[in-house]
Image (cartoon, grey):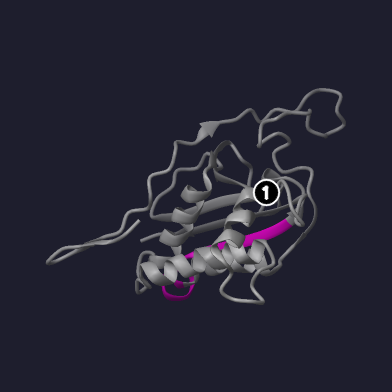
Amino acid sequence: ALAEYHADSMEAPPPRLPPLRRVATHQAEGTGGAAPVSTDPASGNGRGYRSAETDEASAALEDLVATWTAESNGRAEAVSVTGRAVDAVGALGARVSEIVELTPGEALAVMAWAAADGGAHGRRRGAAPGRFAAWWVVAALGGLTDEWPPRPEEVGAVLADMRWYAWGSGEPVTGWALRLAVEAVDGGQRGRSWAVSATDAT
């Protein structure tokens, strides 16, 4: 998503993503608090994670919005867990009420937009740093940061091992927001998930 510059203004809206869909949040009776088996990515709604922590990938997700938090009013938190994508969201203290799976291209686009943008009051970094930050997230997810830059096919292989989601907690979104979750379904990180929640208000 590239910015459009006019004589007296600049527009840099986020990329258009598919609409979030509502998900069921009730628990099945008699499960002892555990979620019923389901193919829904929001099944369990964040109750099954273990070993919530920060790692290189969660740090990279937070760094996407460093300008929002350092130069504006933004707040951001990211976490890594053993569990599903929704479990990572739960480790942030949020509850998923809306979710949609993103294509790898959509996930890269929204990460690049967030990293390029300055939020409400920060200085816009621009599209090139935004793309770099998005690639850095993927490289961190795949353990490819030691030999930079990774080859495009390596980045593609990591993307193929991941499932990406945009999520919401049912609260209205005003200003700037980035709410992503990613789940490793194959490869060396299989069984790990990450989530980021970032907001910035005018």
Residue 122 point in image, percent of width and height: 37, 72
Total of numbered circles in the picture?
1
Whether residue 118 is visible: no
Magenta-drawn stretch contains 77: yes
Horizontal side, residue 30 vs residue 56: left or right = right
Residue 146 point in image, percent of width and height: 67, 77
Label 1 crowd bin: few (<14), some (14–19), many (20+), radius 10 Å: many
Can you tell which quarter of the image residue 76 is in? bottom right
Q: Secondary structure at mark 1?
A: strand
Magenta-drawn stretch contains 3: no
Task: Name the residue beneath numbered marker 1.
Answer: 183
Horizontal side, residue 108 vs residue 31: left or right = left
* Three-letter residue code for mark 1: Glu
Q: Residue at x 82, y 34 (%)?
A: 34
> 89 or 147: nearer the eye?
147
Q: Residue at x 81, y 22 (%)?
A: 29
Q: Residue at x 78, y 24 (%)?
A: 28
Can you tell which quarter of the image residue 80 is in? bottom right
Whether residue 105 is visible: yes
Residue 197 point in image, percent of width and height: 56, 56
Horizontal side, residue 124 vs residue 43: left or right = left
> 129 or 87: nearer the eye?
129
Q: Is residue 124 above or below residue 166?
A: below
Stretch in magenta: 67-80
Quarter occupied by the N terminus: bottom left
> 75 or 9: nearer the eye?
9
Can you tell which quarter of the image residue 142 is in? bottom right
Horizontal side, residue 197 vs residue 129: left or right = right
Q: Residue at x 74, y 53 (%)?
A: 187
Quarter occupied by the C terminus: bottom left
